[in-house]
Amino acid sequence: MKLNIPTKGNQKLKKVLARIRSSKRLATLLECSNVMAINRLGYSDHGSTHVAIVSNIALKLLRNLIDAGIETSIEKDHSMSKEDAEVVVFLAAVLHDIGHSIHRQDHTRFSIPLAIPLLQDFLTEIYAEHEATIITTEALHAIVAHHRDYKPITVEAGVLCIADALDMKEGRARIPFKAGKVDIHSVSAMAIEDVEIGSGKKPIVIKMSNSSGIFQIDNLLKPKLKDSGLNEHVQISIEIMGTEKKILEKLEL
């Protein structure tokens, strides 16, 4: 599995990344997730590309929060380190959608039993049993809380929730759009040209070519940002670029 993740000197994250890259089981689960999501249900990618994007976004967001002085939940509640928080967020980002391999409905719950043996494989000998168990439970909380039914109650889970919603730039909607799924979800997603996540206190910038992209912000990102518990610490700026681009020529019902 190809993953380009900046570990920034975090040796435990580097070791976990190496195991994830070589995991055939995880690669197959992500492949099966896309068969279910794209081929059978007409949704956008929920496989290896999605988790790579979400992983990078989530780590950027977490590091920005840490740089801004926000204490992670694993530091506060378990006296572990910010490096361990990075491992939690990365693992949760990689595993959060594997339940799609079973069904999209309740996929967060289906992800949990599939993730548990993988977490054990990824953490054994890198962490002692006590710390590995803590990381496992924190990652599982983030996985189950990333999608509507359960509210995130840790910083790490909130970060994943926001990162998942920010995988919205134009190319992420092309699969369902080209497959003939023309609705407000696919059309508004086609309007998102780019998502820029800078360092430090710079806002996240979402660039749109058509104002229909507001639907993505209002109905997908805004609720997740609110539920994340981090809305006071995350600033988002929206820009509509130049002359609005035409997305549809016509639509027959």
Image (cartoon, rainbow, N blue to C red):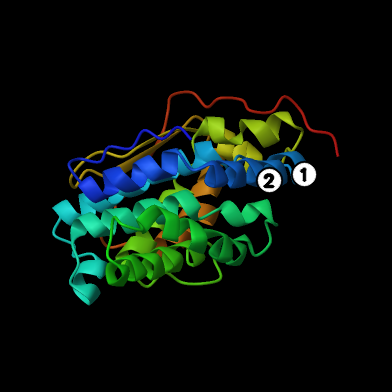
Residue reaching furthest to the bottom: 77
Q: Mark 2 points at which residue?
A: 37
Q: Mark 1 points at which residue?
A: 40
Above or below, comparing residue 130 to residue 247 in the picture: below
Amino acid type at mark 1: Arg
Q: Can I make out residue 110 in this image?
A: yes
Q: In which quarter of the image is residue 52?
A: top left
Q: Return the x and y of residue 228 as percentages of the image width and height.
A: 39, 64
Above or below, comparing residue 192 to residue 131 in the picture: above
Q: Return the x and y of residue 97 as percentages of the image width and height.
A: 55, 53
- Which labelled disc corresponds to residue 189? none
> Disc 1 on helix, strand or loop?
helix
Q: In this view, does 123 lie to the left or right of 65?
A: right
**Is there a contact, CB below 8 Å, between mark 2 and mark 1?**
yes
Query: Which residue is at a point 49% across and 29% down the rendered structure image?
Result: 209
Q: Within 10 angstroms of label 2, few (less than 14), some, or many (20 or more) residues?
A: many
